[in-house]
Image (cartoon, helix red, strand yellow):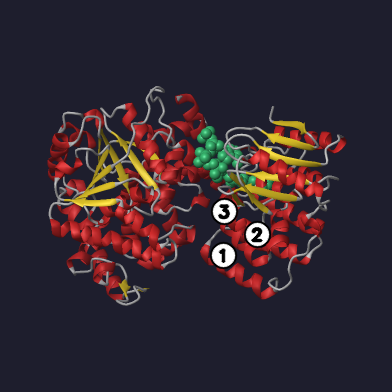
């Protein structure tokens, strides 16, 4: 039963039981109304609302959005609760989120165990609280704190919620007994039916200037997104309109949000993130191996960042460098990074020290004998990696997982150096490793199922979004990035400035444009990689000649103060550099290209088409398991805007036939083989099928 009711002495207890997170699906809404009616009619003096399982209601059922609504709606359920003639007390544990917290706000009193959290995360789904959250929260805590909470979507701890006035009491577990005691206390003191709808929004911080300032701030912080602006409008309505009118306004805004492409994209990413760690066809009996201590080889920026990921999750790390100097530098860098986090107020000094102490340095491979997982993050050279893995094979205990953080190299070849290829896997982190959420888990030919299960589990434990990839040059993300980066170079030589190219992509919502990213990473990295390739491997010289020319002039990107842009040595502020435009012109003339005006639309479209076409190839080859995995990789590893849903979602929304036609047009215009539509795309279009159809047929 989704919702049950019992009378405990003189207190009615409504219990929701809808695993895994007690989402407010249709049956739960219906059950709540029925249980409430029973409670209203019996001898109970107060009603407690609580949940079974790991959490109080964590929100509306996201999978119901976009489908025809079914009565009762959540605002109707909430009106029934708030209108009850006996005190209703919400008893919270786990995470009371979204519609779940809105249900609690409609109760007359709220108590929570100390490790509970409450929040309105709808904005992360391109939505806004649609069952009174934007109207009730400002009435309880004022406009400023309400906007802070609703526009960020961040959960608030029980202690903070109590301080703010969102809940009335923090209680000790067991929750049910504590909530019953609280209810009896309220009955004994003849507590009133405290309805938030009857309160007024504190006037002091509800000025027009205040709302204007929030609109500007959110316009910058959440550039391109519609929901945050609508949230401001709803909270403004709460401060200006009577409750019922405010509620109607909120409902209208909420419905428009649910119908928006942005919300569809964000909901797609929500579910895709949760699908991605599930490995299709994995032996269901394979259990993750326990990971209690981790070794990292290489104390550079990448190795240090990876070490921090584990320390942040409370897992001890042994960090190995070749010599003491390198080790000291690596550990100092980690200390500096923790120091920055502390100075920004994001971590207490004590906690930073605790985490730093979890990272122990060594220069001796023998110290890796007891680690359960070791991740190699050394120089990107097959020769060096082979040496490291041969050494690891000698020192690591049986059953230890040996992982490489390579971005491009063949994990099978690395695995073959060892006597235990079944224990070898790729764990590809993205820089800065302690921040970026993507973790590409690269499955080599012999990687054991339980090693994959462990990789996925440990990835989640350290807060990453793990995505499975098969072995190929660049795996999922970097293989697609090569096509994208090519277009940036070609657009430049054809006549677009770096600023125009980056502007077209950031206008779409990318965190940074491709050329600014190049400057950040260092142009010498690609240059060195190209030196190792044959002319045929390098491809069309027009796709790298500008980059090469800049590096040869000493323009290595941000680190040398100049790359595609010039950088202020103090502030790192970026400015356009006429010298770069001269380099572009010179290279265009050298390669016989007559400059022309490119529109931002053309620039954007070519970059997206380059990603999408390669995405179809990657899917067909089985490099990625699902279209959604590619989307998750691009959102969490490459700054693709989540509210655009990722490259494959973009392709599906645009229509596969339109994508195919555009690719054909590009192929006709340029004669370039890489614009030939991927065979899978061609097939789906010719059969009138979607990517979802393809996935369904495959499994
Ligand atoms: C809303 O409430 C709108 C209202 O204002 C207005 C309405 C009128 N629905 O994340 P996990 C599934 S909008 C459906 O791995 P955790 C999830 O897909 C909603 N399914 O667990 C997964 O399925 P599977 C506002 C949901 O312990 C399974 O549950 N609320 C929902 O790491 C486990 O999820 C939110 O945005 C849902 N609402 O984290 C909260 N939530 O096993 C969204 C989860 O098949 N949820 N599932 O892969 C979360 O943030 C996390 O799930 C939570 C648990 C913190 C609760």
* Badge nearest the viewer, 3 or 1: 3
Q: What whole-number distance in Å separates the C-alpha atoms at marks 1 and 2? A: 10 Å
Q: Residues within 10 Å of mark 2 (few under 14, many from 20)?
A: many
| Residue 675 locus on image (x, y percent) | 36, 44
Q: Are marks 2 and 3 in contact (CB under 8 Å)?
A: no
**Circle 2: element type:** helix
**Residue beneath the point at 85% across and 38% down:** 40
Is residue 140 or residue 537 the one in the foreground? 140
Q: Are the residues tagged 1 and 2 within 8 Å (C-beta)?
A: yes
Mark 3 is surrounded, within 10 Å at the Cα level, by few (under 14), some (14 to 19) or many (20 or more) other residues, namely: some
Write down the residue under mark 2.
231
* The one of 314 and 518 positioned closer to us in this rendering: 314
Give SS at disc 1.
helix
**Dots 3, 1 in contact, CB < 8 A:** no
Q: Position of residue 235 (x, y in %)?
A: 69, 62
Up-down relation of residue 112 to residue 52 (above or below): below
Q: Which residue bears the numbered disc 3?
A: 157
User: How far apart are the two marked residues, 2 and 3, measured between alpha carbons?
Assistant: 22 Å
Label 1, ligand 1: CB separation under 8 Å:
no
Q: Secondary structure at mark 3?
A: strand
Q: Which mark is residue 218?
A: 1
First in sequence: mark 2 vs mark 3: 3
Q: Is residue 197 left or right of residue 678?
A: right
Among the two numbered marks 1 and 2 on one chain, the one whose residue lies closer to the N terminus: 1
**Is residue 605 visible to the viewer in this orientation of the structure?**
yes
């Amino acid at each position: 039963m989704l919702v049950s009711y019992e009378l405990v002495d003189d207190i009615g207890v409504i219990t929701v039981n809808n695993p895994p997170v007690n989402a407010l699906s249709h049956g739960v809404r219906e059950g709540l109304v029925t249980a409430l009616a029973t409670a209203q009619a019996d001898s109970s003096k107060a009603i407690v609302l609580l949940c079974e399982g790991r959490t109080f209601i964590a929100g509306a059922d996201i999978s119901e959005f976009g489908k025809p609504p079914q009565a009762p709606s959540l605002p109707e359920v909430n009106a029934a609760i708030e209108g009850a003639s006996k005190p209703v007390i919400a008893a919270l544990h786990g995470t009371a989120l979204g519609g779940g917290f809105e249900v609690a706000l409609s109760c007359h009193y709220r108590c929570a165990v100390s490790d509970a959290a409450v929040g309105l995360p709808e904005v992360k789904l391109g939505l806004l609280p649609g069952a009174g959250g934007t109207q009730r929260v400002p009435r309880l805590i004022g406009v400023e704190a309400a906007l802070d909470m609703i526009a960020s979507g961040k959960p608030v701890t029980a202690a903070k919620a109590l301080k703010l006035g969102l809940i009335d009491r923090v209680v000790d577990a067991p929750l049910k007994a504590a909530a019953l005691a609280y209810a009896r206390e309220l009955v004994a003191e003849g507590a009133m039916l405290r309805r938030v709808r009857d309160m007024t929004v504190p006037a002091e911080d509800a000025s027009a200037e205040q709302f204007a300032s929030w609109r500007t701030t959110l316009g910058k912080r959440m550039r391109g997104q519609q929901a945050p602006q609508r949230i401001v409008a709803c909270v403004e309505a709460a401060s200006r309109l009577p409750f019922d009118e405010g509620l109607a306004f909120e409902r209208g805004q909420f419905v428009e949000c649910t119908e928006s492409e942005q919300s569809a994209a964000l909901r797609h990413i929500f579910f895709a993130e949760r699908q991605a760690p599930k490995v299709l066809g994995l032996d269901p009996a394979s259990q993750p191996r326990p990971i209690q201590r981790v070794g990292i080889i290489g104390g550079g920026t990448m190795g240090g960042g990876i070490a921090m990921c584990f320390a942040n999750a409370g897992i001890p790390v042994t960090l190995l460098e070749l010599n003491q100097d390198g080790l000291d530098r690596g550990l100092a860098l980690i200390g500096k990074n923790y120091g920055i986090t502390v100075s920004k107020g994001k971590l207490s000094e004590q906690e930073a020290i605790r985490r730093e102490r979890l990272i122990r340095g060594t220069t001796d491979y023998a110290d890796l004998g007891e680690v359960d997982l070791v991740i190699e993050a050394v120089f990107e050279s097959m020769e060096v990696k082979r040496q490291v893995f041969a050494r690891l094979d000698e020192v690591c205990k049986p059953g230890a997982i040996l992982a490489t953080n390579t971005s491009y190299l063949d994990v099978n070849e690395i695995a073959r150096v060892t006597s235990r290829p079944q224990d070898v896997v790729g764990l590809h982190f993205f820089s800065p490793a302690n921040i970026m959420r993507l973790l590409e888990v690269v499955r080599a030919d012999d990687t054991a199922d339980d090693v994959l299960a462990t990789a996925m589990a440990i990835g989640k434990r350290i807060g990453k979004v793990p995505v499975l990839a098969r072995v190929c040059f660049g795996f999922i993300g970097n293989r697609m990035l090569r096509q994208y980066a090519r277009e940036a170079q070609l657009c430049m030589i054809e006549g677009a400035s770096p600023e125009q190219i980056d502007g077209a992509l950031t206008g779409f919502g990318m965190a940074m444009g491709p050329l600014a990213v190049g400057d950040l990473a260092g142009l010498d990295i690609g240059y060195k990689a190209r030196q190792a390739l044959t002319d045929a491997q390098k491809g069309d010289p027009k796709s790298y000649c500008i980059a090469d020319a800049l590096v040869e002039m000493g323009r290595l990107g941000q680190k040398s103060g100049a790359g595609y842009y010039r950088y202020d040595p103090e502030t790192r502020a970026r400015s356009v550099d006429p010298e770069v435009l001269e380099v572009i012109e010179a290279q265009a003339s050298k390669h016989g290209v007559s400059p022309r005006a490119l529109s931002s639309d053309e620039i954007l479209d070519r970059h997206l088409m380059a990603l999408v076409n390669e995405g179809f190839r990657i899917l067909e080859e089985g490099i990625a398991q699902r279209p959604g995995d590619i989307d998750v990789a691009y959102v969490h590893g490459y700054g693709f805007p989540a509210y655009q849903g990722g490259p494959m979602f973009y392709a599906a929304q645009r229509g596969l036939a339109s994508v195919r036609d555009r690719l054909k047009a590009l192929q006709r215009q340029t004669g370039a083989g890489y614009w030939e539509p991927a065979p899978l795309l061609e097939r789906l279009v010719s059969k009138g099928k979607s990517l979802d159809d393809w996935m369904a047929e495959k499994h």
